[in-house]
Amino acid sequence: MRSGFVSILGRPNAGKSTLVNALVGEKVAIVTSKPQTTRNRIHGVLEVVAKGKLPAAQIVFVDTPGVHKPGTHLDRQMMQEVHAALEDRDAVMLVVDASREVRLEEEAAAAPLAEGEVAAEKPEHRKLDWRSEDEFVFGLVEKLDCPVFLVINKIDLVRREELLPLIERLRGRRGFAGVFPISARKRDGLDALVDELVAVLPVGERYFPKDQFTDQPERFLVAELIRERILMETGEEVPYASAVVVETFEEPAPVPVSKAKKPRMLKGGIPAPAFVPVTHIGAVIYCERDGQKAILIGRAGEKLKTIGAAARREIEGLLGTRVYLELRVIVEPDWRERKGFVDGLDWRKQLEELGNKQGRDEEK
């Protein structure tokens, strides 16, 4: 058997989270059209059955925040997550948005000539400006000593006559272990990508149980589902200035077998629907200004109700129980610039604090 960690890098909106969800076959990362949706490293686990000469494998995909030049402390923390993912990995996938690359080429070609420019040289001359962030991404993988695969995503959004030259141009950017044109949304090209990843992974044991598809605790997944709805329901600065922390998570107590009641029978001998347990969740939505709080709550609380209702449906699908969800909005001025607050959003540190609190409660 083979096993290993495969880190996924790319610019914001390259479709990394859609890709890891498609590969794993479960929703392990929230997905929206807004950049910087992913803020933490997210592990998605794929069990691969043996096929032909390829052995069985467990691939741990590490989704990372979109690579960008940091501004706030939150941005710097996100980039630290990217660098951490590159330290402990067996392979790397660099994801590129094919539709963006084609669009930028067209914009560069259509831009008016500057004084002294020659038309034939214009696209090559201009590309250095709008590719500066791409250069930053490619620079992160230049010195890696592991296999790096170039994954050209969203090929369903470009014409074939545009795609082939793009593949050839990007192929020459680095000595990639392989180049894979795919559509994560349509799951095109994923089987060949997985086969190639299995081939380069080292022999080893599973890192996670066979039926586990992520290492994220349910509390963090719930917080992310709430934040996903905020991203989808609000605009401008509000989504980026919002953070979600689950304060209470009360799971329903299991019913002892000895006390389990026989199902009540309806007319015609049909059993009545079984009792569905309820999970009680209380979460806080943090924002930075009073104006953002007003937007999140909405007139007569309608926006917050919309966010809560949509998030609750997603959470019920995740937990398999009914959910009572209580949301509060708190203004925390300039939290993105405060190291202590940003660090406290890391679910690993939240779990550590919960463990410490439980220990103190037991001592009392």
Image (spheres, helix red, strand yellow):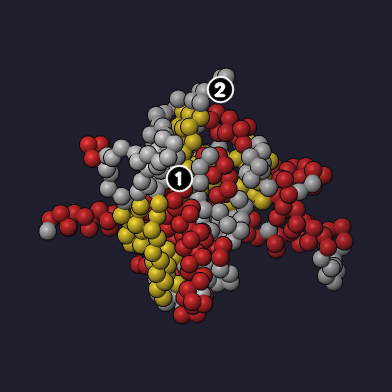
Residue 9 vs residue 177, the one in the foreground: 9
Residue 119 vs residue 360, the one in the foreground: 360
Pointer 1: what residue? 43
Residue drawn at (53%, 39%) of the image: 25
For the residue carrying disc 1, how many other residues have a C-alpha within 10 Å: few (<14), some (14-19), or many (20+)?
many
Tell me the kind of residue under disc 2: Lys
- The quadrant of the image that shows the N terminus is top left
Residue 17 in the figure: left or right of residue 326: right
Residue 106 in the figure: left or right of residue 312: right
Residue drawn at (48%, 32%) of the image: 47
Percent across and percent down for residue 163 are 76, 45
Percent across and percent down for residue 286 are 42, 70
Residue drawn at (55%, 72%) of the image: 237
Visible in this render: residue 85? no
Percent across and percent down for residue 189 are 66, 36
Structural distance between the alpha carbons of marks 2 and 1? 24 Å
Residue 236 vs residue 1, the one in the foreground: 236
For the residue carrying disc 2, how many other residues have a C-alpha within 10 Å: few (<14), some (14-19), or many (20+)?
few
Tell me the kind of residue under disc 1: His
Q: Secondary structure at mark 2?
A: loop
Pointer 2: what residue? 51
Which one is earlier in the sequence, the residue at label 2 or at label 1? 1
Taking 283 as reference, is 257 above or below it?
above
Taking 167 as reference, is 228 above or below it?
below
Visible in this render: residue 286? yes
Residue drawn at (38%, 58%) of the image: 324
Residue 329 in the figure: left or right of residue 114: left
The furthest residue to the top: 52
- The quadrant of the image that shows the C terminus is bottom left
